[in-house]
Image (spheres, rainbow, N blue to C red):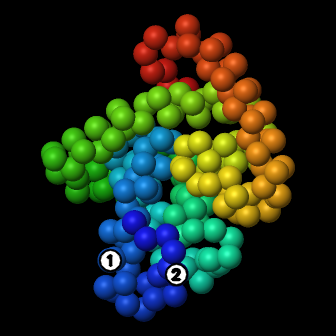
Amino acid sequence: MHTDYDPLTRIAREPDAFEAFYRDHVEPVQRFVARRVDDPHLAADLTADVFLAALDGAHTYDPRRGPVVAWLYGVGRNTIAAEARRRARELETSRRIVGRRLLDGPSLARIEERLDAERESRRIHRAMEGLPEADRRLLELVALDGVSVADAARLLGVKPATARVRLHRSRARVHTRLQELAPALPHEVHP
């Protein structure tokens, strides 16, 4: 995966550039989505939606604010939030029904394997729900998505030292919450 270049200036007008961008970044985006949802069809849809949003919003990427993958995580966060709002308003849509029919058996099996692999991450997300939004975003970027503290601080508009202190406090709170959740979660429980 490339993180030291700006491919976004070309993807809107060059199909080959978008294809290369997609190949370079699909794995981290799939992991990002799989940590946040547990339905394989929804995970496939959201991954595609992240790349469509990246294509539409490529002009908003500023390489001074961090690597491309961190920007994609922000696009992913917005995409997942929009889906949550949509699901709150609607029970089902025809797009999801059609999307499910397009998945073949091996594709669905790969998505289910990824969701199983990210089960613990979803449990951690539940433990993070009590954190303030800014602290939760920082912890997600660093601990779950592998963004450096310095890059996460730049993305969130805070000083690196401030980010390190907030990160330390957030990790302690999440650790305490995970200990509280452990006995109540013998298997995965969905809200």
Q: For numbered disc 1, what is the local secondary structure?
A: helix
Residue at 29% x, 56% y is: 98
**Location of residue 25 (image quadrant):** bottom left
Bin the neighbour count of mark 1 within 10 Å (Cα to Cα): few under 14, some 14-19, many 20 and up. few
Q: Which mark is residue 73?
A: none
Which residue is depicted at the point 54% across and 49% down?
A: 145
Please name the residue that numbered disc 2 is placed on: 6
Q: Is residue 19 left or right of residue 190?
A: left
Q: Inspect the image, locate mark 2, and give the three-letter code of the amino acid beneath it.
A: Asp
Q: Residues within 10 Å of mark 2 (few under 14, many from 20)?
A: some
- Percent across and percent down for residue 143 are 59, 42
**Distance of mark 2 from mark 1, alpha carbons?**
14 Å
Q: Residue at x 66, y 61 (%)?
A: 151
Q: How many marks?
A: 2
Which part of the image, by quadrant, shows the C terminus?
Answer: top right
Q: Quadrant of the N terminus?
A: bottom left
Q: Can you give x and y, in whole percent of width and height, for residue 156 in the image?
A: 75, 59
Residue type, label 1: Glu
Residue 2 lies in quadrant: bottom left
Q: Secondary structure at mark 2?
A: loop
Horizontal and vertical percent position of residue 100:
28, 50
Residue closest to the eye, 71 or 57: 71
Residue at the spot 82% in from the left edge and 51% down from the top edge: 161
Of mark 2 and mark 1, the one earlier in the sequence is 2
**Is residue 57 or residue 63 the one in the foreground?**
63
Q: Is residue 155 visible?
A: yes
Residue 53 shows in the view: no
Q: Report the residue marked by disc 1.
A: 19
Q: Quadrant of residue 71?
A: bottom right
Residue 42 image offset from top left, x and y in percent: 40, 48
In front here: 148 or 104? 148
